[in-house]
Image (cartoon, rainbow, N blue to C red):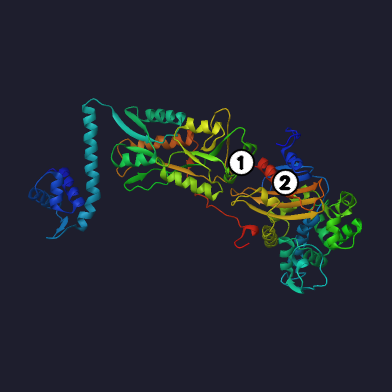
Amino acid sequence: MKPGINPGINPVERVFRSAGVTGWLHAVDIDDGREVGLRADEPVVLASVFKVPLLLELQRQAERGLFDLTERVGVPAGDRTGGGTGLAAMLDDATLSLRDLAYLMMAVSDNTAADVLLARVGREAVNALLDGLGLTATRVVQNCREMLTSLWVDAGVADQSAVTQACTDPEVVARLSALDPAVGNRSTPREMTRLLAMIWRDEAAGAASCAAIRRLMALQVWPHRLASGFPFDDVAVSGKTGTLPTLRNEVGVVEYPDGGRYAVAVFTRSFGTAQNQPRADAAIGAAARMAIDQLRTHI
Amino acid sequence: MDLVRHLGYFLVVTEELHFGNAAARLGMAQPPLSQRIRRLEEELGVRLFERSSRRVALTEAGRLLVPEAREIVARVERMRDLMSDLARGDAAVVRAGVPADLGAAVLAALIAGFRDRRPDVRLSLTEMGTAAQVGALLEGRLDVGLLRHPVAANGLAYGPVLVRHPGVLLAEDDELTAWATVHLGDLAGRDLVLFPRDAEPGLYDDTLASCRRGGFVPTEIVCTDRLEFALGLVLSGTAVAFGAPAEVPGVVWRPLAGAPLAWRCSPAWRTEPGPYVRDFTTVAVQVLKESAGMVDEGVPPAPRVTPRPATGFLA
């Protein structure tokens, strides 16, 4: 235990404080409803976590026959949304099916793929879906390009490389509207775990669509956040990250060999403004494990 | 004719498949042995051996007779032992081997349970590991044992398989006590105190294999079958141990997530169970379930490894 941290406080809170972040968390047993929360109903900035409801609406529109997920879409080299992964980093024209774009969006948080898919399904459709599921605190109002552009504008810089530099300046970070949940894509930890639980129980869409979403969330490549709390061969971790300056998020589902499955949503905001935040990344896994451990005390 | 004695001669010949060697083992000359086998064949009306100048082989009838003859000879021997015990005024005894870590309460329940069921029979318990029990059972020094699986021994029969899933015993200041359930992989870097491999070779290897699969390679393994010694090492923070909860101040027990260790045991006896073996087995199974937290073995879950993209092959 670090000196100066009150041992009487919530152990999840202790994990966040030790990592130098403010944290919001909700974890729920998908099958019996037991839950653990910390500021679970406060609004949080989703960052790339908004790709989960977007994927759900994509699947549901395909179910209704609005398009076929094998339809191939051209993504020209000259029209790419920024970001360090996937199509943004590729140099040539590409043609992918809708469902393979969804794979890139979920596996490596491909922003270009997400914007192509959001343009296809429409923001209003995503929000209507969220209303229908009773997730009224969750809103998708921006695409990735708008989020990134707001960073440039608020930071007063002209391009992506400059924004990375500028956003390590605490004064710049203080005026980024992208970090304000009232402005951009938003939710609460509790609504995110409700969404995941509905996907895992086949309630959010048809069973085949829910299975397709679960497949993509299990294919996410990042090992450093939620998965880092569960370095065990027999535990499955599926998730979707979200990242903006000082924000490190991940929502996902952790499945134990005894059949226990837990939806967990962790949102953090670091006090430090460094671009690299390994302690915040690891705190997401540690806090999630702490919460799920509490849910498993009865086993 | 003395049929039982003739069956005894027959069994020795089947083991040697050589009349000269069998006669030497029986301390008699070959011609009278051959004559007795012929009289047995006449009595039963079948040929038991194919005899040629080079070899002796069992006929089909001979093969069928072997298990029957063994049973008859063993039962008669047991009957004689029992009667001679009674003639000497000794009470009847069943000699049972039990593992060292059974615990005082379980042991007491076992003895009390057997006394209730068979007040006329004395239960003689010996503390023994599986390897020693196998030897003692096969040599007739024990009537029944409680063996830990996996065990490979010919000539033994087994009662129901019971299983328990041990948790981990930690010093109370170990940081892992913060968790309600501990994963095997969390134990990495710690020493382990475990029963000796000589005593429980199968279970020892099985337990360490499960530990490695779960990401726990003990820095050092200290072997002991003394519970007090093991708890002392745990208490001092020197090592962790697997087992049931211990009511010892300073030692904390936690379940292992996913129950990765399955410790199985079952009663075992020579192929022919002695007269009180079934009584002992019935009592032991009941006591192990009620007092030692064991359950009937269900279908063991297959160990699973969930794929993760970042740790995929060639990733």
- In the image: residue A181, left or right of residue A298: right
Q: Quadrant of the N terminus of chain B?
A: top left
Quadrant hosting residue A77: bottom right
The one of A105 and A99 positioned closer to us in this rendering: A105
Q: Quadrant of the C terminus of chain B?
A: bottom right
Which disc is residue A283 wearing? 2
Which disc is residue B13 wearing? none
Cα separation between marks 2 and 1:
19 Å
Total marks drawn?
2
- Neighbor class of circle 2 (other Cα within 10 Å; few <14, some 14-19, many 20+) is many
Q: Position of residue B135 (x, y in %)?
A: 32, 41
SS category of the residue bearing label 2: helix
Quadrant hosting residue B157: top left
The one of B178 and B120 positioned closer to us in this rendering: B178
- In the image: residue A92, left or right of residue B215: right
Give me the chain letter of mark 1. B
Q: Position of residue B121 (x, y in %)?
A: 32, 29
SS category of the residue bearing label 1: loop
The one of A135 and A117 positioned closer to us in this rendering: A117
* Labels 2 & 1 near each other (Cβ < 8 A): no
Q: Is residue A237 visible?
A: yes
Circles 2 and 1 on the same subunit: no
Q: Position of residue A246 (x, y in %)?
A: 81, 50
- For this orientation, the residue located farthest to the top is B89
Q: Position of residue A187 (x, y in %)?
A: 81, 51
- In the image: residue B84, left or right of residue A165: left
**Kind of residue at disc 2:** Ala
**Kind of residue at disc 1:** Thr
Give me the chain letter of mark 2. A
- Neighbor class of circle 1 (other Cα within 10 Å; few <14, some 14-19, many 20+) is many
Residue named by callout 1: B181
Q: Residue at x 28, y 30 (%)?
A: B92
